[in-house]
Image: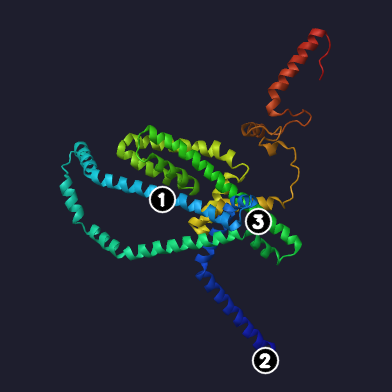
Amino acid sequence: MPRWLPRAMVLALALVACLQLGTWAFHQLTGLLINILIAFFLALAVEPAVSWMAAHGMRRGTATGLVFLAVLIAGAGFVTLLGSMLAGQIVSMVEEFPKYLDSVINWINSSFRTELSRVEIQNNLIHSDWLQKYVQNGASGVLDVSAQVLGGLFQLLTVLLFSFYFAADGPRLRRALCSVLPPARQAEVLRAWEIAVDKTGGYLYSRGLMALISCGAHYILLVVLEVPYAPALAVWVGLVSQFIPTIGTYLAGAVPMLIAFTVDPWYALWVLVFVVIYQQFENYLLQPKLTAKSVDIHPAVAFGSVIAGTALLGAVGALIAIPAAATLQAFLGAYVKRYVVTDDPRVHGHRRRGAGPVPARVWRFLQGPRDPRVPRVPWARTEAATGTAEQEQRTASASGREPEQ
């Protein structure tokens, strides 16, 4: 046996053990790594406000605390207002549910000539097997829901704590990162950090401005329709539609439609029409102007990044996908060499001169080969060339000279 073989076998086994241990540790720490990633992007989002306050003489720790306190107060007020609104509406809907059920049963009986009664439907529903199983499963799942709520609160506190340290100790973190890199790499890291701050902060602030505009527009509609809890519903539509990608618009419009339906079913239809029209106005007019400087990213790239982020990290990936893609695009754009584009009509979406449309080319193919001694006239200019030749012949006849061949 060669002397190096036992050592190589031990080394190979050690590498396999380290790989297995690293894989196990990564799977165990996936939740913590996702929380740290969320905290980092949250710190990047509040970095412009914290830096502005620190530039005016305030300590970074105090400035970071004030920013996070404002965010927490706004979030708690929104959740409280929305919870009270939903609780009141649920109570009123439960109280009015027998009337809604009677109206639906009367419509079914008059339309389909049936003899349904509300008491019979309620008895069949109460004594059904699936309802009893659902109640039993719900009672057994109360502890699971409580554990999920506590876990969610712990994750929220973890994210806030890490984001506070990232924002408050941002300069120290950058110095620590640059201290292990050569000077050339330090400039690239600082440039990437600055681009990430600009893109993430710009994305957040542009979304906040669009949420404010959406709140105002939907508040006016709900006030005109006399829908209750118009301020809370407007805030709900503005925040959910802007900060939840792809499906946020539909989730945001469902709640005001439901509450408007309790007032008048036609009001729900008006709310739906307004939500669709406003979404088109926002996508094609408002959003390109507001995000042109902050997050200059193509809509197709944004949609693809949201899908990729959702596939990788779920809802968290969907939230941070657009600023991450904008940061990567801006960082790569600074190092990609670009050239002057040739002045070709095909670059601007035009066809090559003389090619002609497809039917003309098919007709020329069916006519067969032409005499090479006869000059070929482009299809698009045949009529114009014929008219020019006739005009020259008439002019030559009037002047008494031979026309040019």
Residue 32 percent across, percent down from the top left = 51, 66
For the N terminus, which image quadrant?
A: bottom right
> Relative to 114, is 60 above or below?
below
Q: Kindly report which numbered mark, 2 or 1, lies closer to the viewer in this rendering.
A: 1
Q: Is residue 380 left or right of residue 220?
A: right
Q: Residue at x 29, y 65 (%)?
A: 140
Distance of mark 2 from mark 3, alpha carbons? 54 Å
Is residue 161 shown above or below 249? Answer: below
Please tell me whether residue 246 is drawn above or below residue 29 in the rendered image: above
Q: Which mark is residue 259?
A: none
Amino acid type at circle 2 is Met
Q: According to the image, label 1 marks what residue?
A: 79
Name the amino acid type tagged 1.
Answer: Val
Q: Which residue is nearer to you in this view: 401 or 266?
A: 266
Residue 299 image position (x, y, % from top left): 57, 44
Marks 2/1 in contact by CB < 8 Å: the verdict is: no
In this picture, residue 272 sits left or right of residue 4? left
Marks 2/1: CA distance? 72 Å
**Where does the image place residue 130, in percent across and percent down from the top left?**
24, 58
Classify mark 3: helix, strand or loop. helix
- Residue that carries the numbered disc 3 in the rendered image: 193
Q: From this view, report whether residue 263 is shown above or below residue 63.
A: above
Image location of residue 36, percent across then percent down: 54, 62
> Which quadrant, please, contains the C terminus?
top right
Q: What amino acid is labelled 3 in the image?
A: Trp
Q: Is residue 245 visible?
A: no
Residue at image mark 2:
1
Can see residue 11?
yes
